[in-house]
């Protein structure tokens, strides 16, 4: 396969060196996508996120076939909640708080059924899974070390939700010098208008945080 790929992206095409590129799939967990999890306890319509599953699945398949590094992330906390700041635990009036027992186990707790990645996108044993306590995938995780170890300079980023964990991670990555290409139809939000604006914020001003391309454009460049 060719080493370089050109993605037809906005605000402009971007050329990626595939061996220096990783696919980062953000928080495609049952807690966000399925009824009875964290997302629903916050009052959200979790069916809004289902549309991202197929596009991510297609890019994940291509990444596996081309040997592109795949990194999955999961938002969640230790069973004793010692890594969850009070400000996160106390806010709002969710139907169940982080750590409470729901139908998929304790809400947003590592090791519980709801915390795990949805079956359609389940990581292979060979793939990297980053557990993160925050919205950004760099904060309090080993992600920066992993990317350095593999010589990664470019990130294809997808997952949920567009304006929360995807945007936070892209902003963290951009400041660390990574080129980020966000896969538009591989992201979703509980709020369609936030999804749209979340993507616009990334690619505005000459790509202030990165590039945006749909899964078809990414797949074309991976051929
Ligand atoms: N609530 C919401 O939109 N998102 C999160 O809490 N976490 C992620 O985006 N993963």
Image (cartoon, helix red, strand yellow):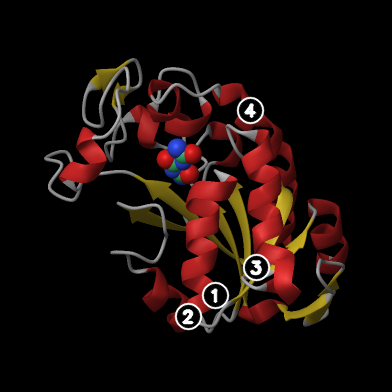
Q: What element carries label 1?
A: helix
Q: Residue 220: x, y in percent?
A: 88, 62
Judging by the rendered image, the residue that carries numbered circle 3 is: 68
**Marks 3/1: CA distance?**
20 Å
Give yes or no for contact between labels 1 and 4 (Cβ–Cβ under 8 Å).
no
Q: Is residue 71 above or below residue 105?
A: below
Query: The residue tagged with tag 3: helix, strand or loop?
Result: loop
> What is the spatial separation of the Cα atoms under label 3 and label 4, in whole angstroms?
28 Å
- Secondary structure under tag 4 reads helix
Which residue occupies the foreground of this view, 208 or 79?
208
**Which comes before the other along the chain, label 2 or label 4?**
4
Name the residue carrying label 2.
Answer: 176
Residue labelled with disc 4: 48
**Residue contact at pointers 2 and 1, CB within 8 angstroms:** yes
State whether residue 26 appears in this view: no
Instruction: Name the residue tied to disc 1.
Output: 174
With 203 as the anchor, is 30 left or right in this view? left
Distance from disc 1 to disc 4, alpha carbons, whole Å, reads 27 Å
Q: In which quarter of the image is residue 129?
A: bottom left
Is 160 displayed left or right of 84 in the figure?
right
Upstream in sequence: badge 1 or badge 4: 4
Rendering coords of residue 118 (x, y %):
52, 34
């Amino acid at each position: 396969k060719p080493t370089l790929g050109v993605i037809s992206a906005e605000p402009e095409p971007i050329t990626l060196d595939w061996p220096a590129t990783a696919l980062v799939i953000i928080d495609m967990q049952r807690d966000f996508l399925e009824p009875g999890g964290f997302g629903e306890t916050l009052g959200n319509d979790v069916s809004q996120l289902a549309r991202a599953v197929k596009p991510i699945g297609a890019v994940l398949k291509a990444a596996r076939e081309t040997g592109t590094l795949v990194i999955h992330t999961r938002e969640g906390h230790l069973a004793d909640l010692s890594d969850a700041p009070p400000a996160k635990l106390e806010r709002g009036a969710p139907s169940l708080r982080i750590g409470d027992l729901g139908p998929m186990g304790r809400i947003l707790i590592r090791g519980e059924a709801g915390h795990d990645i949805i079956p359609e996108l389940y990581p292979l044993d060979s793939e990297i899974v980053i557990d993160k306590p925050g919205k950004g995938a760099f904060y309090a995780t080993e992600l920066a070390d992993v990317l350095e170890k593999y010589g990664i300079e470019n990130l294809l980023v997808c997952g949920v939700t567009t304006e929360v964990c995807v945007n936070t991670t892209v902003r963290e990555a951009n400041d660390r010098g990574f080129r980020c290409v966000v896969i538009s139809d591989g992201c979703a939000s509980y709020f369609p208008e936030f999804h749209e604006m979340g993507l616009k914020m990334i690619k505005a001003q000459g790509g202030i945080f990165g590039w945006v391309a749909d899964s078809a454009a990414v797949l074309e460049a991976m051929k």
